Amino acid sequence: MGRVKSKDKRNKRGTIGLGSMFEAYTFLMGFALLIWAAISLFAFNLLINVGVIYPANYAEYRISEAFEQIETANEVTADLIPEVCRYVVFSEDGQVLSGDLDEKDVETAWKVLSNMNYSDGRFYKVISRPDEYVVLQYRLKPQYKSMWMNEHLPNPENLLTIFILICCVGIMQIFAKKFGSGIRKKMTPMREALEQIGDRNLDFTVYYSGVREIDECLVALDDMRYALKTSLQKQWETEQEKNRQMSALAHDIKTPLTVVRGNSELLLETELTDEQKNYADYISGSALQIQNYVQTLIEVTKSQEGIEQAPVKVKVSEILADIKKQTMGLSEVYQLQINWKEECENEAVISVVYDHVVRAVMNAVRNAAEHTPEGGVLNISANYRDGKLVFTIEDSGSGFTSEALAHGTEQFFMDDSSRTGGSHYGIGLFFAKKVAKEHGGEIVLANSKETGGAKVEISFMGQ
């Protein structure tokens, strides 16, 4: 706990919180928005000063300039009317004499002239003349100098508002992306630490971001890294100790095996019946096989990753002869009848790891023998064609259950209701599957239609 506290103290100095970062970005964004609004208003006023846009009271100013001229002119013509106004000329009885207002606006202008206090959002100015009236229509809003722009574009104030809003949204997006980019940059130490752990590298230094909340996560992550490293170190030491003990035990097993093998060979030198010679030969061969397995176990325990053997070219007939010999020995032990069939050219050669292939097939054969009643039958066929060696083993036992068919080749699977003996611990068929896969083949579990028992097909491709 002291190690964690020291880290916390070290990382609290010179760090800021995510809330403070967000407040800083919010303040800067608000300041940028105010600056942009001020620039937009300045540009708007500049356009007014240069005459591109008229101010809101420009129409009243122009009307006051033209009022006397319109009032005293012999005839009201369009050139007397200010360019920011529309007009209509009425006679005393309400007839339209001239003008450029549409019908609806003419009706409104007459209502205004009749003092009906009617308004539709526009402003009107009435100028009395001898025997007629001039009504001017105008707006108290900024307007463009160009009448075409007044007709086809939003009012300058509305356009300015839209423009400011769009630019404000753009500014907010820029600051949001900048804030996100800053957070991603601050998260880099976290991402790098996770990548190191994902790559199973626990011997690295954690660098901190300067953001309080992220650094707290990094401290916790560093503690987890340290704990995981310590745990794996202890596990590795335990595995090493277990391997040393297994290696010592395997060495101890070699001594009685050597005695068994030596005595069986001495027994073969005595006068024996043919049946006794077969038994002694089985004992000698099995003792040699066990000795080879023990030697493999010793070599495996010397390395955490086990050993890899390179495939060698060997005659297929030699593999078949070895497997057949061991199978016949098993048949004597379990009192079984063996139906052996093989199809192979005498000179056929395959490139495999010899011991692994023999052991894989014998695992399947031994599994079948253990689950066949005494006096039962094992059908074993071996076929080599086009570089593929296939073994099919059928027994006359109870067959595989549905669960065993689905999981029988998984490591440590044992189906107590059907086909698992107490001595295999679910490893035999798993090893057979592993070897078949390493040789480009496969193992298939099924139930035999011929014998009613289990059926195992295991194949190997020459490398």
Image: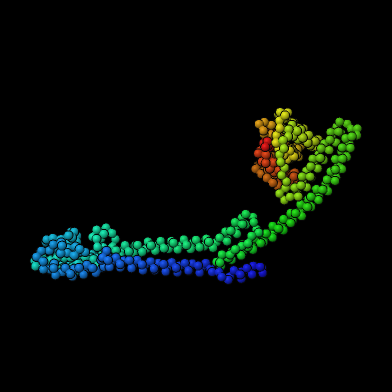
Res 238 → quadrant: bottom right
Closer-to-camera residue (454/320): 320
- Judge whether 309 appears above or below 221 on screen: above
- Judge whether 322 appears above or below 183 on screen: above
Q: Is residue 463 left or right of residue 16?
A: right
In the rendered view of the protein, which quadrant contains the C terminus?
top right
Colour scheme of this structure image?
A: rainbow
In the rendered view of the protein, which quadrant contains the N terminus?
bottom right
| Residue 373 shows up from this direction | yes
Q: Pinpoint residue 255: horizontal percent, then vertical percent.
A: 85, 46
Image point (24%, 58%), residue name: 148
Q: Is residue 265 left or right of residue 337?
A: right
Image point (64%, 55%), residue name: 200
Res 66 → quadrant: bottom left
Seen as rendered, the residue at the extreme right is 271
Closer-to-camera residue (399/275): 275
Closer-to-camera residue (442/366): 442
Q: Pinpoint residue 339: horizontal percent, then vertical percent.
A: 74, 31
Res 366 → quadrant: top right
Image point (71%, 37%), residue name: 352
Image point (69%, 31%), residue name: 384
| Residue 452 shows up from this direction | no
Closer-to-camera residue (11/115): 11
Q: Pinpoint residue 331: horizontal percent, then vertical percent.
A: 79, 35
Q: Pinpoint residue 340: horizontal percent, then vertical percent.
A: 74, 31
Q: Is residue 374 left or right of residue 123?
A: right
